[in-house]
Structures are given as C-alpha cells and as structure tokens.
C-alpha cells in the first residue's frame, strides 16, 4: 500500500530528472563555453590588432598621413636594408645568448632546490629569495645596474681596490655585456619556475633504479633527468625568448644607444609617424617569435606532457 501511495511522487521525480537530463549541455559544448572568455580576450586584444597591423603594413604613407593601398615596399625595405637586418640579427643574438645562460643557471638552481634541499620549508624560503627581485619594477632593477657597473661604480672600485686592475673596466657598462647581464638578472626566474615544476614531478625511484643499474651521475642527468624535465625547459625557453624579443628598454638603457632591437626600431618609426613600416616590422616580429615557439612545441608536446 505504501508503495502504491508513493508511486505518484516517484513518477514525478523521474519526470523531473528526465527534464533536467534533456536540458543538460553536451560535454563538448561545456568545454567551448569554458574557453569562450579567453578566446574573446585573445581575439579582441591580439587577433584583431594583428590583423590591423597586417592591413596597414601594405599601405602607402608620407609625412602627412597613410593611404590605403597594396604595396610591398615596407617588407622589401625590411629584407633588403642592411641596417634593418643588422637590428634583427642583434635581437636574435641577445635572445640566443640570454636563453643559453638562463637555461644553464635556471636548470642548475632548480635541480639544487628540488633534489638537494630536502626540507620543504627551506625550499620555499629559497624560492622566495629568488623571487624577491620581482617585488620591484623591472625598470628599477635594470637601472640599478648602471651605478654598479659604471666606470666609478661599485664593481670597478672593488676590483681596483683589490689590485686586479689599475684602471676602470670600460666594457662593463653601455655594451652588449651589460645588456646580457640585465636580461639574465630579469628573466632567470622565468626559467627556474617551469623547470622546478617539471623536476618535482620526477619519480625518485627512477633515479635510484638508474643508480643501482650502475649509471653515472652524468648518465642519470642525460638519460633520466633532462628528458623528464623537457616540458619545463620548453616552457621556460618560451617565456625567456618572447620577453627578450619583445623588449627595448633594457637594450636602450644598458647599451647606451650602441645596440638596437626590433622593438626599439618600431618605437622610432612610430615616433616618426612611419606607420606602415612599423606595422610590417611588427608582423615580421610576430612571425619570427611564432616560428621559434612553434619549433619548441614541435620538439616537446607541452599539452600532452602537462596532462600527465
């Protein structure tokens, strides 16, 4: 009797559940809705401006304005001008040197923090010490190197006081050396973080098994540690390379105007209201960075590695 009395309630609940099930969105639709806000932001802030740059890069221009046209003069100037190619070469040179140094420092620091610092609290303290410079502006951190590396700076006074040299070292400031030093100081942490994250996911039993099998320290590093940390290396490399390729303040300040970058050339062209050449340089820069990032992603499937 009780079952018969509760039958209408059961039927009502079943109908309600069926109604909710009918209105449930498919998983694929839910996934698209989740990425829709980020997609909208990328379209508005990146895709549309890039498309605008691409269109303007074919325009004609003079001292009074720009005019719709389809000219290849801006791109022809980029690939035939020796000075422009020299600027691109300088930027790529800085990117390669800074990438190599930050990779070496970042990997070794991350390896020490993950494999040699056993106490998690001490490890966190060391990470915070690495991050302390980021508590101040990048501009301030860059400018702080000028009084340190100057002819009358702290470093020159120290080496002269110790008798290593009788006159100030002139190559320390307003040179490629000072540019690289500033870049390494600014971006090494961007390499430490992703590599440390990858190293922390390595199963220690793999290292112990390799050691028990008679592998040397360098064999373990080459065949176990580095292959398993390639995702962090790729992500750190992307962060460092894109930052160096898109910077002009460090080059302008630390080289004393003796070196140039693509973005600094863009700034000069914009100030001179040469918008089509500036747009063409922006498009070429985006293509170069995209190719470099694409090559790294071809070597390491970051999405697949992160889903493990």
Image (tube, rainbow, N blue to C red):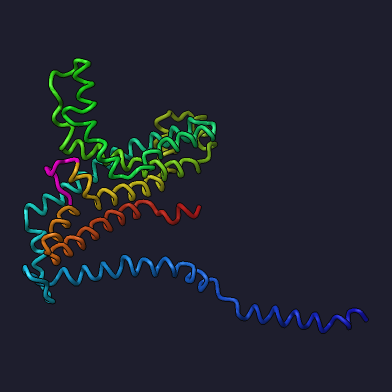
The answer to whether 12 is drawn above or below residue 248 in the figure is: below
Q: Is residue 296 left or right of residue 180?
A: right
Q: Position of residue 123 (x, y in %)?
A: 49, 34
Does residue 213 show up? no
Q: Residue at x 47, y 28 (%)?
A: 214
Q: Residue furthest right?
A: 1
Does the rendering let one see residue 49? Answer: yes
Tell whether 91 sits left or right of 16.
left
Q: Is residue 56 magenta?
A: no
**Residue 225 drawn at (x, y percent):** 43, 38
Q: Residue at x 6, y 53 (%)?
A: 82
Quarter of image, res 25 = bottom right
Q: Which region is colored magenta?
A: 254-261
Q: Is residue 167 above or below residue 279?
A: above
For the residue pair 308 and 268, the one nearer the viewer reads as 268
Image quadrant in which you'd find residue 138: top left
State the image coordinates of residue 20 (x, y, percent, origin top left).
Answer: 65, 78
Nearer the observer, 129 or 58 = 129
Residue 299 vertical placement versus 275 (above, below): above
């Amino acid at each position: 009797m009780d079952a018969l009395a509760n039958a209408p309630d059961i039927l009502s609940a079943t109908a309600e559940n069926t109604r909710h099930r009918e209105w449930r969105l498919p998983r694929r639709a839910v996934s698209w809705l989740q990425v829709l806000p980020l997609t909208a932001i990328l379209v508005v802030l990146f895709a549309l401006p890039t498309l605008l740059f691409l269109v303007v890069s074919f325009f004609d221009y003079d001292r009074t304005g720009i005019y719709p046209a389809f000219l290849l003069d801006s791109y022809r100037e980029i690939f035939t001008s020796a000075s422009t190619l020299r600027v691109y070469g300088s930027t790529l040179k800085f990117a390669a040197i800074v990438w190599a140094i930050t990779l070496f420092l970042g990997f070794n620091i991350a390896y020490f923090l993950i494999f040699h610092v056993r106490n998690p609290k001490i490890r966190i303290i060391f990470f915070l010490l690495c991050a302390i410079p980021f508590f101040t502006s990048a501009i301030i951190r860059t400018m702080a190197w000028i009084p340190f590396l100057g002819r009358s700076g702290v470093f020159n006074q120290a080496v002269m006081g110790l008798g290593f040299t009788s006159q100030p070292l002139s190559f320390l400031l307003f040179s490629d050396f000072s540019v690289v030093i500033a870049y390494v100081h600014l971006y090494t942490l961007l390499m430490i973080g992703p590599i440390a994250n990858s190293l922390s996911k390595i199963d220690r039993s793999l290292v112990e098994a390799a050691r028990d099998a008679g592998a040397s320290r360098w064999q373990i590093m080459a065949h176990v540690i580095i292959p398993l940390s390639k995702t962090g290396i790729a992500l750190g490399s992307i962060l460092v390379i894109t930052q160096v390729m898109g910077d002009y303040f460090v080059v302008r300040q630390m080289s004393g105007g003796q070196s140039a970058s693509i973005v600094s050339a863009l700034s000069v062209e914009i100030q001179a209201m040469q918008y089509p050449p500036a747009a063409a340089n922006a498009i070429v820069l985006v293509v170069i960075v995209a190719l470099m990032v694409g090559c790294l992603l071809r070597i390491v499937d970051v999405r697949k590695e992160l889903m493990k």
